[in-house]
Amino acid sequence: MSWARLDDRFHGNPKVMRAWRSAPAAVGLYVMGITYCAQHETDGFIDEGFVMLLAPREQQKLTAALVQCGLWHEVAGGWTVNGYLDFNPSRQDLEEKRRKDAERKARGRHSE
């Protein structure tokens, strides 16, 4: 299981507050998008299909609110979370950590 990180000042972030005033459900979508990115190690990319599953009737309204506030950026096939890698490790960093952990555990097994 991986973890996603939010700044502890998230609730007062001006971009988040603008999204909240525009479309409160957009903030929920934003957080769910961050956890999606962490689970699938997308480095901040959110696939259009994921958003369609969560908000089929409100996709355009919610994503527009997030883009207009600067929390998401529209890209081919979906969106990217602004600043995702400032708070969360990249896929490459996670793979390197897993590799080092596996090597450390293998050394430990061989030393017994």
Image: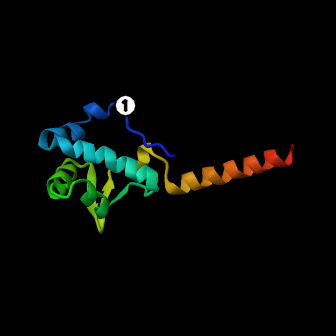
- Residue 74 is situated, as x and y percent measured from the top left of the image, at 26, 61
- Residue 57 is situated, as x and y percent measured from the top left of the image, at 15, 57
- Residue 68 is situated, as x and y percent measured from the top left of the image, at 17, 51
- Name the residue rendered at 85%, 49% in the picture: 110
- Judging by the rendered image, the residue that carries numbered circle 1 is 8
- Name the residue rendered at 43%, 43% in the picture: 4
Q: Is residue 22 left or right of residue 10?
A: left
- Residue 92 is situated, as x and y percent measured from the top left of the image, at 54, 57
Q: Quarter of the image for the C terminus: give it.
A: top right
- Name the residue rendered at 33%, 31% in the picture: 9
Q: Can residue 58 be seen in this view?
A: yes
> Residue reaching furthest right?
112
> Residue reaching furthest bottom?
76
Q: Can residue 83 be seen in this view?
A: no
Say what amino acid the circle numbered 1 marks. Answer: Asp
Kind of element beneath mark 1: loop
